[in-house]
Structure formats: structure tokens, C-alpha cells
Amino acid sequence: MPVRAGSGRRLGPRRRLRLSMAVTALFVLFSILSLAQSPVMAAQTYTWLQQSPATSPPVRDQATMGYDPSTGNVVMFSGYDGTSSISYNDTWLYNGTTWKQVADAGDPGCTNTCTNSPPAVDGEAYAFDTATSQFIIFGGYNGSIPYNDTWAFSMATDTWSQTVNAGCTSSCTVIPPIRQFGMAAFDSATSQVILFGGYSSTTLSDTWAYDGATATWTQETPATSPAARYAGNMAYDAASSQVILFGGYNGSVKFNDTWAFSPSSDTWTQVADSGDAGCTSTCTASPPGRTLGGMAYDPATTEILLFGGFSSSLALNDTWGYNASTSTWTQYSLPAGCTNTCVNSPPPTNEPGMAFDGAISAGVLFAGIVSSAPSNGTWIFNYAQTSSVTVAPAAGTLAFVSVPSSVAFSGLTLSGVNQTSTASLPLDIGDATGSGNGWNVTLSATTFTNAAGDTLAYSDFSVLSTSPPTVACDTNSTCTVATLGSLYPYTLSATATKLLSSAAGTGMGDQTVTIPWSASIPANAYAGTYTSTWTFTLVSGP
């Protein structure tokens, strides 16, 4: 008995200064910070995007689709509207942006009664013959019986022609027997359309080859064949010169095995799931079993794409890629392991049409059964060429950004009693090492001396514990404010002693440390201007 596949009926970085600061002498050193960027490394992810063409074909499932590289168009023919029980025979082209109905110039807008087209059927086997630039369809089901007619759509003239036994439908001779839901793919190495299986009055497992140049069918005689099935998916893998078959149904089992056919040697070989040799419907490293998913070969990634279809009880929206060089399937849809709840994907879809559009480097998905009804949405799938950019700043320097050239204690007048004065000394420090080691500043000073040779004691100058240094990030600098060690009270010395200490993990970036100095001038000091040279040294580590 003829069948329809599906649910129910369906098968369901800057400049820096290093300084030695003196009140009377200043030494300036320069260093440059370089910011180096490592090479950009490409990474591939995928994305599904729903399109909004101004015009779309009517709702349907089981649309047959193929891509013509010579014109850069996807061609689509026929399909089935289960809601209205209509099989279509209209022909459409998609140029990556818009859909346009073609053929039947004398019957514009036709859907299922197009007079210059093949009969209105669904469930045909189909493939695009790039050698002759023709879209080939074979067989199908008209609602009563399966067919075995062969038709070709010429992309050059936008016309259909029956290529074998003109006029026949279900009794064509010297060609494959009648069938629906046969699986086909075009082998560009031998310029043949390869047909496998289908359903007539029984489930089939025969293999045939169609030569578009001579319009002839030849039955192949492989020693081993996949189990009889229909409504699976086939696509040609140009990188391995193999036709890849996945899934299908035999009336009781939804298959998830993967087979490769080599037309040059006339051999079928089961591939993938090497640790599960001979599996049919329980292959552990393959997508779940299904019928009538969307399938197409992506020449840019040399992978076969698989989307959706119908499992034992539900429509799917998972996306997979098959790599023939490693005989492995990879699921692209998320979350991992999803079947019909995958995010950023088309809705669960049974019986969609699919082809890979080389002009836009994207898989084109059209229609299918969504929420139990035929649809006419257009989606594209591609590997979004994102960039995983690694920016690796080269280790810069630890340096003084600026140090004041002079500092003065003011407001001092001898009066017979001890005098005090304060002065703020800002040190602008830049840690661009990216090490997080922290840093420290040491200070040594010459004796404060006036022109007459009189001196002041080192102990007259100090940083008090009651007024320790303060730290603030420089303008336009996102710094990690230094956590300063407890070094106060600090007394000036001729020997280099630690004045500042930034703890590890702090002090990164440009920041200014303001040090409040206190001068205590004894009452018996001689009058005059006293000068001292202070030398600051900045080194890594607390």
C-alpha cells in the first residue's frame, strides 16, 4: 500500500619617565611601553537566521531543493500541503534574498496545476546535476500510486522536460521501478545521480545511477547494501567522493546508521560508530534516528549538514555535521544533546527542504511541518566567521611617570623657638609590568646645607605616622590602588631606606602617591636657604 511519511501520516597601553629627583637637580630617563597583539585565530560557530523575503512559496512540506552553482540559485519544486491535501507542482528559485516563481510562463501563479511541469506529486527522489545544470526528480506519489518518471529542470531555459520514456508516469520502462521517498544525491566525480531505496508496495534497497548527459538509468550491483528503507537523507561529499546516506524508515524502525557509497567502485560501506559496527537504529555516536530531515553538503567546511526531521514520536530541531574524513558526527545545536528544544534554531520541523547555497555560503532551509501544520518559512544556516582575538600586552616598565623638580618648606621665620613646616611631595608611579608583584621606593638624601656651610640634621625631617601618604589613580588610568606598608614614622637618612611599599597585587597602573613631609627647625638654627638632593629609586616587589 502506498504510504506518506510523517507524524500520523508522517514519518515523521604610553610614554613613561624614570627620574632621580632632587630639590636642586633632576635626572630624566625615558622608556617606552609596547603593546603587542598576537595573531588572530579563526573560530567557527554556527547561526540560524530566519529570512523575510517579500514573496514566499505557499506553505508545504517535502519540498525538493537543489543548488545550481552556475546561476547561484536554489531551485525548489513540489511539496505537499497536508492541511489541504494538495501536492504541488510549482517551481521556484531563491537567490539568497528573494523567491521567484518560474516555469509555466503561460500559467503564472499556478500551484498544483502547472501545465508545463511534472505531475503534482510529493515524495520524489531528487538531486541537482551540476554537469548538465539540471535539477533531476524521480518518482513520487500522486495520492494514489507511486510514479517512476524522470524529469529535468533546465536552469538555462527555466523549463521542465521528461527525459526518459516521455509521457509515462508509473509504467516507465528500462528505469527504476515505481517508488516514493527514494533517496538521491549527485556524484560530481562520475557525473551521476545515485538513487537508493524508497517504497513501492514494499521497502526497497536497490541502487541506481542516472547519467544526465545520456538520460539513462543503470542499476548498480554492490555486494553489500544498507538495509531496505525509505524517507532517509542522502548528500554527496565532494571531499571524499562518496554519497552519504543517513537514517530512514522501514515501516517499523527509524534508522540512525550512516553509509557511504563509492560509485567508482560500486560499494556501500557502513561508516561512523566504528565501535558499534553493524548498528542500525541504536548507533551511539550518531544523531537520533529520523526520517525526512534537511540535509546538504557544505563545501567550505567539507561537512554534511543535517537538520530536523521526525523521530519516533516528535519533530526535531537539532543540527548536526558529518565529517567524512573522520567518519564522525558533531552536534552543533545547543544545549548539548537537545533534540526538539534546541535554542537559536528553527522550530521543530518535519520534512523540510534544504540545499546549500554556495553564493551566500549558507544552508537554505524551507518550509516543513511546524506545530503539526505545513509552513513556508525560510531559514539560512552558516558557520558565522567569528574571531577569537587574543590581545597580549607585552610587559611594560615599572617607572616614575613624574617627580617634582623642587619642593619647598615655607613659612619659616626664626623666633627663638623651634619652628615647624610641612610640604607635600607627589610621586607619580606607573606599574605597567602586568606582574602584580607590587613595588617599593627607597629614598636617600644629602645633608641640608646653606651657602655658609651650616647644616640641618636628618632627624629634623620626617613623615609622621599620623599623616601617612595617600594614593589616587591618575586621570584616565584604571589602576589598582597601592596598599602601602606600615613604614611610618619615617625619618630622612643619608642611606637609601624604604619610603613606600606597595603590596603584591596592588599598585598596578598609573597612580600618584602624595607624601606629607614635616620639617622641625630648631630655634638655634642659622638663617639661610638649605638645600638637599633627594634620590628616589623604584624597584619591583613590596
Image: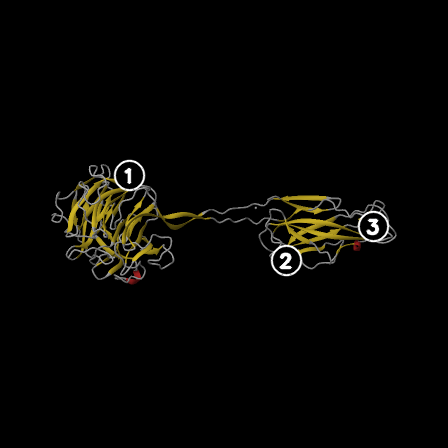
Comparing labels 2 and 3, the label whose residue is closer to the camera:
2
Where disc 3 sits, the SS reads strand
Instruction: Give the foreground label among 3 and 1.
Output: 1
* Residue where numbered disc 3 is placed: 455
Residue under numbered circle 1: 71
Question: How would you rate the neighbour count of disc 2 (Cα within 10 Å): few for under 14, some for 14-19, many for 20 or more?
Answer: some
Circle 2/circle 3 CB separation < 8 Å: no
| Earlier-in-chain disc, 1 versus 2 | 1
For disc 2, the marked residue is 503
Query: Which quarter of the image is occupied by the C terminus?
Result: bottom right
Residue found farthest to the front:
84
Tell me the kind of residue under disc 2. Answer: Ala
Position of residue 394 measured from the top left corner of the image (x, y, whole percent): 55, 48
Q: Nearer the viewer, mark 1 or mark 2?
A: 1
Label placed on residue 146: none
In this orientation, which residue lies closer to the viewer: 260 or 109? Answer: 109
Secondary structure of residue under mark 1: loop
> Is any atom of residue 240 visible in this view?
no
Q: Is residue 252 visible?
A: yes
Q: CA distance from mark 3 to mark 1?
A: 96 Å
Q: Residue at x 19, y 54 (%)?
A: 198
Q: Residues within 10 Å of mark 1 (few under 14, many from 20)?
A: few
Relative horizontal placement of residue 509, taking residue 203 as reference (left or right): right
Q: Position of residue 321 (x, y in %)?
A: 33, 53
Comes first in the chain, label 2 or label 3? 3
> Percent position (x, y) of residue 361?
34, 44
